[in-house]
Amino acid sequence: MALYGLTIHELQAMLAGRHVSAVELTRAVLDRIAAVEDRVRAYITLDPEGALQQAAAADKKLGAGSGGPLCGIPFSIKDVLCTDGLRTTCGSRILENFVPPYDATAIVKLKQAGAVLLGKVSMDEFAMGSTSENCAFGPPHNPWNTAYICGGSSGGSAASVAADECIASLGTDTGGSIRQPASHCGVVGLKPTYGRVSRYGLVAFASSLDQAGPLTKDVTDCALVMNAISGHDPRDSTSVEREVPDFCRSLQDGLGGMKVGIPKEYFIEGLDPEVEKAVMGGIRHLREAGAEIVEVSLPHTDYCVAVYYLVAPAEASSNLARYDGVRYGLRDTSADTLLDMYRDSRSAGFGPEVKRRILIGTYALSSGYYDAYYKKASQVRTLITEDFKRAFAACDLLASPVTPTPAWKLAAKVDDPLSVYLSDILTISANLTGIPAISVPCGFSGAGLPIGLQLQAAHFNEEKLFRAAYNLEQRLDISRLRPANL
Ligand code: GLN
């Protein structure tokens, strides 16, 4: 297989043994990008010179035997994580020319582990969306069929991994944005427990929901990236002081003694039969690997979308107030007054979905409506959290689809935001409750588009997710399949 098609764990040995250099590997991935990027369009900013410099530095360390665990591995980074000296747009015109003066903590940690940063990848503007079509610089295309969406908001991350335009990627997940594109593009994606990975330098969308995490070619790589980016950060007061295990440690343990719950409310009308079939097939494999399958109930599932689409826009309306044309980002210079400058900068800089969220969020927080909307949503959020606590008293993991349908055609739903919001129903509760969740490939639709299986666990139980996902991956043996026509 070509170098760019290999996984981190395969490349680690080759790099450490000096069978291949980091510069050779980086060049191979850059050549791959040059060959397919006009069809995939995953990158907003590519930094070939910077990447080759980092690769040369990695080679020095590898030569001296002092390289970190990701030494020389080329990564793509969702354009919402701040990168020192490298433009960070958040997929928005308002930050089109914003070059951060510092690295996000997750980026610092990747660099400390030796990773090579290739560039910044496409996303829905400020991570608001499920298709990546809300990106101001055009959407990425699904590598399995370029007429289709690759999901979102970390669509560029998922597409770049699936198209072998990087070895691994970092994305962020506020309501499914790592897991849903991972599912649509046939790669592995993990949303860690809230607090596991520092949010410092992650441009905020909804601060009580946002988490950064890996998108990778297989489960082992996902665990390796988590080893590098997890841990307490004094710069993020919501990051948790808790020991980080070696997430690779128990991958190969079987599933004997593990109870996997099937939430009955997740297998409902509207679930695509092909998705149901693939996911049920995956669940059968979990049983054959030794897990006991039990039915569980999450009675407040029906309220998740409504709660999320109040809480997330409310937090967004507050977080996005900082884009005022004064401190950074786009400024309208033709206005005569300060207020006009604020209004014109924001009108020109934000796209329609971001404006819609700011309107909803500002309304939900306004005096007289706060109790009816934001407060009520927060109370129902607690009820949803209680549902999950009860479920995890009866089982170790929850298995379900990631999304109700496979990817749809580009532009098919751009005029129907509500139906796009509804498609988030199976992913948003992990963010509302803060639990970890993973998407792992489990099959394909008749049209050849990937389908993912979601596993969710109680807080800080990522190891259980990895163990079950690894067992599934070994049995299905589809994670190495790549789009044939690319
Ligand atoms: N699709 C959801 C939204 O539009 C989730 C996005 C995300 O996780 N960043 O808000």
Image (spheres, helix red, strand yellow):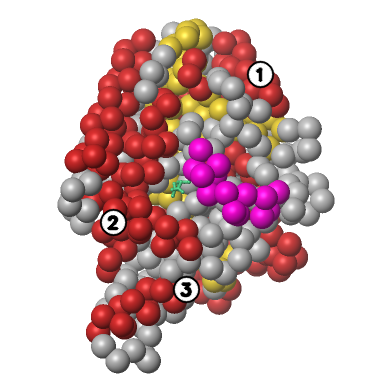
Q: Residue at x 18, y 48 (%)?
A: 368
Q: Is residue 244 left or right of residue 113?
A: left
Amino acid residing under circle 3: Arg
Is 278 left, or right, of 208 in this rendering? right
- Magenta includes 368? no
Other-residue count near label 1 (Cα within 10 Å), few / some / many at <14 / 14–19 / ≥20: some
The secondary structure type at the circle numbered 1 is helix
Instruction: Give the labeled residue for mark 2.
Output: 362
Q: Position of residue 86 (x, y in %)?
A: 44, 73
Span shown in magenta: 409-422
For residue 281, which numbered disc appears in the image? 1
Q: Indicate which disc residue 93 carries.
A: 3
User: Relative to the observer, which residue lies in front, 219 or 365?
Assistant: 365
Q: Which circle's residue, 2 or 3, is located before the other in the chain? A: 3
- Report if residue 404 is visible in the image: yes
User: Where residue 283 sits: x, y (%)?
Assistant: 58, 17
Position of 474 relative to 3 (above/below): above
